[in-house]
Structures are given as structure tokens and as C-alpha cells.
Image (cartoon, rainbow, N blue to C red):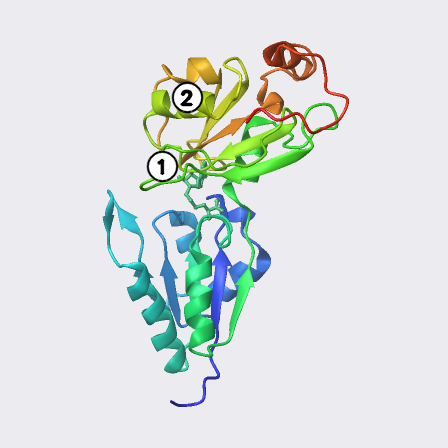
Amino acid sequence: LPAIIAKVYLVGAGPGDPELLTQKAARLLQNTDIVLHDSLVSREVLDLITPNAEIIDVGKRAGQKLLTQDEINSLLVSYAVQNKMVVRLKGGDPTIFGRAGEELDALRRANVPYEIVPGVTAATAAAAAAGISLTDRRAASQVLLTTFSRGENGKQMDWGAVTSTTSLVLYMPGAEYAEVSARLRDGGLPADLPCAIVSAASGARQMVRWSNISRLATEAKLPAPALLIVGRVAAQRAHEISEQAWAALDESPPAASTTRWI
Ligand code: SAH
């Protein structure tokens, strides 16, 4: 193999608004040979790519994969071996539900130099859209970025310790809100625990719907991409954080922070 002087950058494209791109990401998009991007990356961000770069859409469209993960891994390595500078551009942050782990493994195995450039992940963009503080001294001491486990044991929750002071951010909730609601209930969360559905955070069509776990079952679906913020911090009005939310738990505030629902 020839000596590799090129590099693969795993770059976060942020949640959509190009102003939320890091300066480093913007600079790399201006100076790269190749961009491999997901379908989640916004048009406005793609417009910042230098016209000299080759742009490859490796994302999924309408559930149909354009390229398999193995094919993407091989592409990254093969371009780097050709001494090209490669930007692997992912929506949000590359290390959050972005399959970065598999790509990093492939790059390490092939001895390809790489660098990760973080981005604003959908959880914080959605919290900003909704005016929610994900941690709050009064209501939330931890944040869990999660998604439903898929596959054979898909019905089983594997969230570990979700407590009364956890803000849970559910990525890729899917279209079946009734099922989401049921699974949150199965996970031990109270029916009247507040939640907010946030769609297209930071984009022109950003939308927030305030709900709770039980009402979620009958909410009309919001357009993708959307996620759910679940927890006492998702009470629509700030004062509800201290009042309604404790009522939801049907208990007095715990002395220690170790109250577990599941
Ligand atoms: N790496 C990305 C997440 C990829 S998984 C990140 O860090 O944000 C894709 C899921 O992210 C979507 O199904 C949706 O739940 C969420 N998502 C991504 N962008 C979003 C946006 N602008 N608004 C709301 N949710 C978004």
C-alpha cells in the first residue's frame, strides 16, 4: 500500500441550521476532496461544500439503503488510500446514533488517520427549540440519550436506571406513537409524565408538541426527523416542573436521587 497522507474527518453537520455548524466543519467542507453524507444533512449545509469536491449521498431514502455500512467503510478507506481528503458528514454529532464506531474500527484496521469533529446533536437542538433545560437543579440531574432497542429483543427496555430525575431523549421514536407510549409505560414511567415531540429542530419547519406519556398514544404524527424529550423538564410551563411533575410521580420528592422506576 502507498503511504497514506490523507485523512478521514468524521464531521458533525449539526441539526440543520447551517449557523449551528462548527467553524471547523465549515472550513473542512470548503477544503475537502470528497464528502460522503447521510440523508439527514440539510440542503443548506450541503450548499457550503466546495464545488471542487465530489459529493456522495450514502444515506437511506424511504427506507431503502443506498449503500451498506460495509460499503461505506470500504469507500472511506479506499479514498484515503488514494491520498484524498475525505469528509464523512453526519447529521447532528457523528458519535450519537451515527454508526461512527463501525467506521472508526474500519479506519483503525486500515491504519488510516482520522479525526472526529463534533456537532450539535439533535437532543440539544430539540431542547433549544422547545425552550427546555435538559438538566435542572429542581427536576433533572441526568440526561439519557437513547433509542428503542431493535431486533429480537426489541420489546425489552434496556435503559438501565431511569430515575425520577432523568431527562430521557428518545431518538428515532418511529411513527407509531401508541407503541412508543406503551413502551415508555412498560419501562415504568408514569402515564402523566410530560413529554415534548420536537420535529425538524433548528430548521424552517421546526415544530414542538407538548404532551404526556398517555396522551402521546393519540397524538398526530409530526414529520421526520423528530425526537421525544420525556421527563419533568418537558412540562410546558416552568412552574409545572415543581408542581404537576411531582404529582405525576404520586410520591413526595425523594431524599436521595436513586429512586428507580424500573
Ligand atoms: N447523529 C444524529 C442522530 C442520528 S439518528 C445526531 O447527533 O443528532 C436520527 C434521529 O435523530 C432522527 O430519527 C431523529 O430522532 C433525530 N434527529 C436528527 N435531527 C433532528 C432534528 N433536526 N430535529 C429533531 N430530531 C432530529
**Disc 2 crowd, CA 10 A, few/some/many (<14, 14-19, 20+):** many
Looking at the rendered structure, the number of numbered marks drawn on it comes to 2
Instruction: Name the image quarter holding residue 157.
Output: top left
Residue type for callout 1: Gly
**Disc 1 crowd, CA 10 A, few/some/many (<14, 14-19, 20+):** few
Point out the residue furthest to the right here: 255
Residue type for callout 2: Ser
* In the depicted structure, whether residue 56 falls above or below residue 193: below
Quadrant into which the C terminus falls: top right
Give the structural element (helix, strand or loop) at label 1. loop
Q: Position of residue 121 (x, y in %)?
A: 53, 45
- Give the numbered dot on residue 154: 1
- Give the numbered dot on residue 181: 2
Confirm whether residue 91 shows in the render: yes
- Give the numbered dot on residue 258: none
Horizontal placement of 72 versus 211: left or right?
left
